[in-house]
Image (cartoon, rainbow, N blue to C red):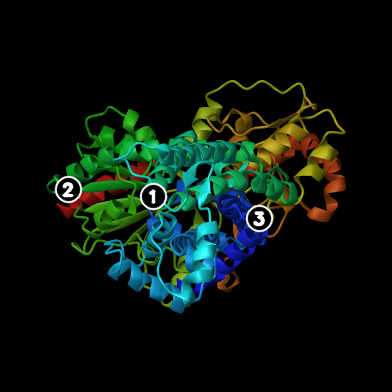
Amino acid sequence: MSVLGTALGWVMSFIYNMIHNYGLSIIIFTLFTKFLLFPLSLLTQKNSINMVRMMPEENKLKIKYIDDKDKLADERLKLYKKYKYHPILSSVPLLIQIPLVLGLVYVIYRPLSFVLQIDSSVIDGMKDWLVNVVQSTKTEDNVYQVEIINQIKDGFLPQGSEYKDAITDIQELDMHFLGLDLSKTPSLKHFDRLLLIPLFSGISAWLLCWVQNKINILQMAQGNVNKVLTTVFMVAFSTYFAVLVPTGVGLYWIFGNLFAIPMMFLTNLCMPPKKYVDYEYLDKMNKQRIEKEKIFKANSAREKEDYQKFFAVKKMKLMFYSEQSGFYKYYASMIDYICEHSDLDIHYVTSDPDDAIFKDTRPQIKPYFIASNKRLIPLFMKLDCDMCVMTMPDIEKYHIKRSRLRKNIEYVYVFHGMGSTALTLRKGALDWYDTVFAVGPDCMNELRDSEELYKTPKKRIVETGYPLIDEMIEKYESTEHKANEVPKILIAPSWQPDNIIDSCIDEILTELAKTNYEIIVRPHPQQVRHEPEKFEVMTEKFKDNKNIEIQTDFSSNNPVMESDILITDWSDISWEFAFVTKRPVLFINTPMKIMNNEWDKIKTKPINITLRNVIGVSLETDQISTINDAVGNLLANKEKYRETITNTLHEHVYNVGKSRQLCGKYIVKSLENKR
């Protein structure tokens, strides 16, 4: 501290010798430090801008990993690198301010050494005089120089020619400013004018916070509660701090707060925050995060209760697991069969608090909400039942494992899509399942080819078919459908890099808008969830075209079932649309969706490729200009496609119309045999 004090003392001495006013010297010194630190302020401003720019993405991460703090921390570090944000840099001005204040305290307590620059040997002699002659008890290192000044000004003078010049300088030194002795410390025991310094210190802190809340980039991004708490803390701290230190330090603190205000305006002028930050979007994402955290907190108690309820069950036979509400539809028809043809209790674990299963009031249905990894992982590790039915591939490879408590549980895999297993699932994704409900012969052949290629144990493959497609066909054919007066085109892409939305949606819409078609863009729910702003921009762009609708509400299947043509890339919605409505599909050949890089080692060719030009036609991305011709040909030949698609359905899907019964019957019979 003596090194810093010496440096600051030299600056204070230089300023004092120029103006001979102690209070003004402190004020000018304060302004000097602000200008000295201005380059650092600019660097901090840039870092703060980076921080606020990344806050919407950080809020997305907080929503996504709300129950996984380790993953959140990892992803946040990646975000810091992406935006070049350094967390410690924001604290540097405060860290520098602390030694400056302590150094100034050191200087103010030693005016003989630093302001008057009196030789240390003379000061030591005066200290001895103070102790021995005046018999003063105030000889602590932090106050003795101030006491020497007070004694000399009161007429008590040390004897000796070596003190003559020093005494003259001391008698001329005035440490008062506006009637306040800047060498003294305010005291609550004596209510005098010195207490004005703590009062004005608190007021200056309030004024600084008020301005910060209006123009400082970090404070503008904070919520109202945080702004109020910060203001209260700063006012309380500044007031209390000014009571503990000499009045001169309090004067420095007051003007430090006041000078910080124009410095903020100057910093914003050099680097305006609104040029870099979308505060409206920032506020929107912050509200979403707060709402999600409220919901998460409310669901935590519910989850804990359901977890305990689940493990209170004795001799559990059948469990279903659903990752989210949308997966219920893959189980619904087989659950109906089980309830109708057995007395089995169906223990249904879901990670979605709003899952449709909670609306099912049948006594056989026992739903549980378990979402956080801290409960979901041990639930599977300690699972004790006869059969577990899931749509989740890759068990054992990631966080969800087979039971470590019981080895003979039958794990049954149910497909949630009709596409190629070789393309759409990772290598070995089903290796740890005992039983697979196969959609069709292509599915069966791919699984057997994979077992042969990688020498893995043979699974039990049941030729069930696809219950969802049966249910959709039944509903569609039992409903009256009117022909569209204006052809309706549905655009429903997959969720993968360079899909239709990312690569060519604008070009497609521009071309289709040249004709009299009703066009609905129905993006993948996950892309809407992760990139909502993209579809807000798209909606705004085409808002004046009444024939184009950007649809992000997925509560109804009507747009799918009532469309004349589906345009997609590699989405499994192509099978559902074509096989249910018997209408053709226009495929855009964006980069293929590949989950398994060794897919081409499987002998059976993927239906995603082989049936592409059977149930419709495909276009390369550089052929978008011809899309109206392709759509016109599909519409003109829709009856021909109806026959082709119907035949293709029965060739490539098992037991059309009977899969519900076969899935349910297998589950019931298998559990009966285990008894």
In the displayed structure, does residue 128 sit left or right of residue 88? left
Per the image, the residue denoted by label 3 is 19
Q: Give the amino acid type for the residue marked by disc 3 in the picture.
A: Ile
- State the residue in front, 374 or 559: 374
What is the number of the mark on residue 97? none
| Residue at 52% in and 39% down | 204
Front residue of 441 and 549 = 549
- Quadrant position of the N terminus in the picture: bottom left
State the image coordinates of residue 631 (x, y, percent, origin top left).
Answer: 80, 39
User: Does the CB distance between marks 2 and 1 fall below 8 Å?
Assistant: no
Disc 3 and disc 2 in contact, CB within 8 angstroms: no
Q: Residues within 10 Å of mark 3 (few under 14, many from 20)?
A: few
Q: Earlier in the sequence, mark 3 or mark 2?
A: 3
Query: Where is 667 relative to 445, above or below?
Result: above
The image shows residue 484, relative to residue 408, as above or below, that is: above
Rendering coords of residue 496 (x, y %): 62, 54
- Is 233 above or below relative to 376? above
Q: CA distance from mark 3 to mark 1?
A: 24 Å
- Among numbered discs 3 and 1, the one appearing first in the sequence: 3
Q: Which tag is nearer the camera, tag 3 or tag 1?
A: 3
Disc 2 marks which amino acid?
A: Phe
Q: Secondary structure at mark 3?
A: helix
Q: Indicate the secondary structure of the residue bearing disc 1.
A: loop
Q: x and y percent of residue 142 in the render?
A: 37, 64
Question: Quick check: 467 above or below 122?
Answer: above
Asked if the residues shown at circle 3 and circle 1 are in contact, with their CB atoms under 8 angstroms apart, the answer is no
- Disc 2 marks which residue? 311
Q: Which residue is mark 1?
A: 185
Q: Is residue 133 left or right of residue 248?
A: left
Q: CA distance from mark 2 to mark 1?
A: 66 Å
Q: Nearer the viewer, mark 3 or mark 2?
A: 3
- Position of 544 compared to 268: left or right? right
